[in-house]
Amino acid sequence: MAKEPAWLIAARAKLGTREAAGPANSPTIMGWAKRLGTKVLGMVYNADSVPWCGLFVATCMDEVGIAPAPIAVRAKSWATWGQNLAADTLAPGAVLVFERPGGGHVGFYAGENATAYRVLGGNQGDCVSLTWIAKNRCVARRWPTGRPVIGAPVQLAASGAPLSRNEA
């Protein structure tokens, strides 16, 4: 049996993918948008300067045959997708949705400490990365409907790294 869900393995494979600097666009990120298309994303996605955390999560899900959230480019669309998970039943790969100034953020649960979640997500520092986000910003914890939860909460030592404050 797999130790991590397939979509988290797909997400880890994308670590380090970056936006292009200035007015240019990353061919990788734009390729994700083209593959998913307007119907899945809910909009014409034409620049990697547009927040792309939802695009990243949708790409990872789509690659393993799981339908993304409606209007997948919007982080908060993921708050009602799939099934709810209680905070004490999280497992690596759970979809976490956060509040942030001006909108939301979505990424995958990779672990936690007493006050923050370790999140593997897109558009974190303009790239696919791991970052710490305060638990009190989390508004939803989700898992694909009909898929067994693999694993359990992962306790990590406090890193001393600063918490992410804005993932736009």
Image (cartoon, rainbow, N blue to C red):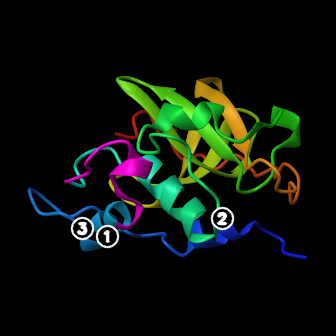
**Up-down relation of residue 135 to residue 28 (above or below):** above
Q: Which residue is mark 3?
A: 26
Between residues 44 and 153, which one lies in front from this camera angle?
A: 44
Q: Nearer the viewer, mark 1 or mark 3?
A: 1
For residue 134, say whether it is visible: no
Q: Which mark is residue 31?
A: 1
**Up-down relation of residue 24 to residue 141 (above or below):** below
Secondary element under disc 2, as helix, strand or loop, is helix
Identity of the residue drawn at 38% across and 67% down: 35
Quarter of the rendering occupied by the C terminus: top left
Indicate the amino acid at tag 1: Gly
Identity of the residue drawn at 48% across and 69% down: 15
Q: Which residue is mark 2?
A: 8
Secondary element under disc 1, as helix, strand or loop, is helix
Query: Gap in Å between the C-alphas at discs 1 and 2?
Result: 19 Å
Query: Gap in Å between the C-alphas at discs 1 and 3?
Result: 8 Å
Between residues 156 and 49, which one lies in front from this camera angle?
A: 49
Report the magenta residues as a range.
35-46
Between residues 141 and 71, which one lies in front from this camera angle?
A: 71
For residue 20, say whether it is visible: yes
